[in-house]
Image (cartoon, rainbow, N blue to C red):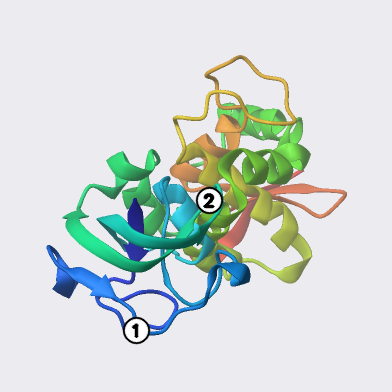
Amino acid sequence: MYKLTQLDGSDFFSGTINYADNVGKIIRLEEYDGPKVGTCGRGLHASKNPNDCFIGAKIPCRAFKVKGIDKIAGDKRKCRYRALKVIREIEDLTALLGWNYTEACNPINPFTITPPKIKKEHIQLLHDWDSVWDSVWDSVWDSVGDFVGASVRDSVGASVWASVGDSVRASVGASVWAYIGSLFPGIKTWKYITHKPGNYPFQSVCDLWKSGLVPSYDGKIWRLHGGPNGRVLWNG
C-alpha cells in the first residue's frame, strides 16, 4: 500500500499526521468511523496503486510504502484503516508513479524560452496540430486519469495561462493538455483519436512548446505566441 503526503511529510487532509517522522513505526487513530460510512470516513487511507492516492493528494508530494492494519472499509481505489505501519519513504517518484513526476513538478514554460524565427517547419507543426487539437482534452483527461490529470494540470498550467488573454485561453489550454500528455510515455494508446500505437498523437504542439512557441486560435485566426507575456509572433 502507498501513501502520498505533503512535502513536510504530513497528510493532505488534516496536516496533523506526519509520516516522515514515523518511518518504522505504527500510526494508530483513537477515533474513526465504522464500516457503514465507506471508504471516505475518518481513518487512515492508503492505496495499492500510488496514482490512486491523487484522489486526495497533489503534486509536489512525498511517497511512503505503508502496511494497512485493521481494515475498516475499501474499494478498488483506496482503503481505510485504523492503523498504518510506515515501512519506508520512496524517493524516486517518477519510477513509482510511471510518469515524469520530476518534469511535472518543474514543467517547461515555453514563454521563458527565446523563441525561434518562424519557419516553414513551425507552420507545418501548426498544421499538424490544427488537425488534432480539438480532441486533446478528452483524450488526455481520460487516458491519464482525472485525479492525476488535475494535479499535473495545476502544476503545468498556472504560469502559461496567465501569460495570454481570455479570448485565446481555451486553445492555449489545449496545448497545456498536450504537454501534460507527453509526460506519460507509458501510455501507448490514447483514447478518442486514431494514431499509430506508441506514437503520441499530439507531439506536434509539444515540439512547438519546447522550442518556445505556443499556438492559439480565436475561431478565425491561428497565432503563434512566444517570449515574455506570450506576445504574438505570427498569425495566419
The answer, for residue 217, to whether it is visible in the render is yes
Q: Nearer the viewer, residue 235 or 213?
A: 213
Between marks 2 and 1 in the image, the one whose residue lies nearer the viewer: 1
The answer, for residue 113, to whether it is visible in the render is no
On screen, 39 above or below 202?
Answer: below
- Residue 89, quarter of picture: bottom left
Q: Secondary structure at mark 1?
A: loop
Q: Secondary structure at mark 2?
A: loop
- Residue 57 percent across, percent down from the top left: 45, 65
- Number of labelled discs? 2
Determine the residue positioned at 33% across, 71% down: 6
Q: Which mark is residue 77?
A: 2
- In the image, taking residue 223 as reference, residue 17 lies left or right, namely left
On screen, 53 above or below 42?
Answer: above
On screen, 35 above or below 234?
Answer: below
Q: CA distance from mark 2 to mark 1?
A: 24 Å
- Residue 27, quarter of picture: bottom left
